[in-house]
């Protein structure tokens, strides 16, 4: 077998593997099965969202809130793959049965359309997102993985995956994104003495306690309806005369992108959290 033939075959294999693992979008009906995954539709929006929705949001067609799960035969061919259209988000209680979750305090929310939480002060692994790159979020996530996996921390600790993953977007006075960063929580067992990053593109930061407001979404971060949740969240807060901090929005991820029922949250921070 010639060296030229072997080199050509190796190239074909690499290209094929690259295509196999490249995300092809929510419309791609691949058939991979996630072991142990069984999708169960939540009984109600309250169970799924974690708060009472505002009636005027549901009844106003311009907000696209009155959707039908599974409408248009848009679900994937197998029962183990992600739902391809918008759906009720996976309840937090179900997610946190399988993964460690940030120990946030749920507090009563006035009115409708959002949940209120207190995020405790904690250590996070943080990397900047290169907004000029199409795969900037994924690349930042992979940099953090180097630290989480033990490859690039001073104790060689392999740390478990903790939810949620936060992507903070810092906004200018016109609401345009100036910069962004991704944060992954250090597990609770290492919070008192977190390892140091040995990778100069990932830092360990202690984030202060924050009061936040959230809306849940079942779908994907590129959906227009997901971006709409930030507008609806502001409207719901305005009903209660709550003014969030204007220079930050946070994309909150709880589920494995592509597989199973999804949960994203749109998060805004209480203005008083930045008053000090």
Image: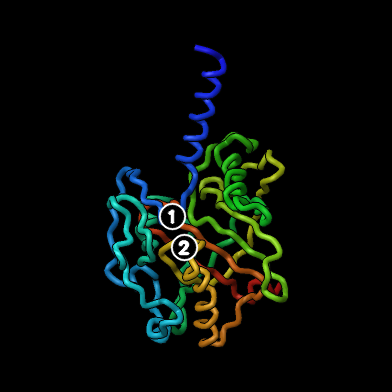
Q: Residue at x 46, y 57 (%)?
A: 254
Task: Compare residues 188 and 252 and report the one nearer the observer.
Answer: 252
Q: Residue at x 31, y 68 (%)?
A: 71
Q: Residues within 10 Å of mark 1 (few under 14, many from 20)?
A: some
21 in relation to 180, above or below: above
| Count of numbered marks | 2
Q: CA distance from mark 1 to mark 2?
A: 8 Å
Task: Compare residues 185 and 139 and report the one nearer the observer.
Answer: 139
Q: Which residue is mark 1?
A: 255
Side of 273 where 83 appears, left or right: left
Q: Residues within 10 Å of mark 2 (few under 14, many from 20)?
A: many
On the image, the x and y values in percent for residue 221 come to: 50, 62
The disc label shown at residue 264, or none: 2
Q: Earlier in the sequence, mark 1 or mark 2?
A: 1
On the image, the x and y values in percent for residue 148 come to: 56, 42
On the image, the x and y values in percent for residue 255 come to: 43, 55
Q: Secondary structure at mark 2?
A: strand
170 in relation to 110, above or below: above
Side of 170 where 231 appears, left or right: left
> What's the coloring here?
rainbow
105 in relation to 253, above or below: below
Task: Compare residues 135 and 218 and report the one nearer the observer.
Answer: 135
Q: Residue at x 50, y 78 (%)?
A: 232
Quadrant where the image shows the C terminus: bottom right
Residue at the outermost top position:
1
Q: Secondary structure at mark 1?
A: loop
Q: Contact (CB < 8 A) between labels 1 and 2? A: yes
The disc label shown at residue 213, or none: none
On the image, the x and y values in percent for residue 95 come to: 38, 56
Q: Residue at x 32, y 54 (%)?
A: 76
Q: Hey, which quadrant is residue 176 in on the image?
A: bottom right
């Amino acid at each position: 077998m010639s060296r030229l033939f072997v080199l050509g075959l190796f190239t074909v294999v690499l290209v094929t593997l690259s295509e196999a693992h490249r995300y092809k979008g929510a419309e791609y009906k691949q058939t991979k099965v996630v072991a142990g995954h069984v999708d169960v539709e939540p009984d109600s929006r309250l169970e799924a969202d974690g708060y009472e929705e505002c009636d005027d949001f549901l009844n106003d067609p311009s907000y696209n809130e009155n959707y039908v799960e599974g409408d248009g035969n848009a679900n994937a061919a197998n029962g183990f793959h992600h739902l391809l259209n918008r759906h009720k988000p996976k309840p937090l209680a179900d997610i946190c049965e399988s993964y460690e979750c940030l120990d946030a305090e749920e507090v009563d929310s006035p009115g409708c359309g959002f949940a209120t939480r207190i995020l405790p002060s904690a250590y996070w692994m943080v990397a900047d997102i290169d907004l000029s790159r199409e795969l900037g979020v994924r690349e930042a996530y992979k940099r953090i993985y180097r630290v989480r996996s033990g490859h690039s921390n001073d104790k060689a600790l392999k740390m478990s995956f903790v939810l949620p993953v936060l992507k903070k977007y810092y906004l200018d006075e016109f609401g345009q994104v100036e910069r962004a960063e991704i944060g992954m929580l250090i597990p609770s067992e290492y919070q008192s003495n977190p390892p140091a990053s040995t990778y100069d593109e990932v830092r360990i930061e202690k984030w202060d306690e924050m009061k936040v407001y959230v809306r849940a979404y079942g779908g994907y971060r590129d959906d227009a309806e997901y971006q709409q949740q930030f507008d609806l969240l502001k409207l719901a807060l305005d009903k209660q005369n709550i003014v969030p901090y204007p220079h930050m929005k946070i994309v909150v991820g709880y589920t494995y992108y592509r597989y199973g029922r999804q949960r994203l949250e749109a998060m805004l921070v209480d203005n008083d959290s930045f008053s000090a």
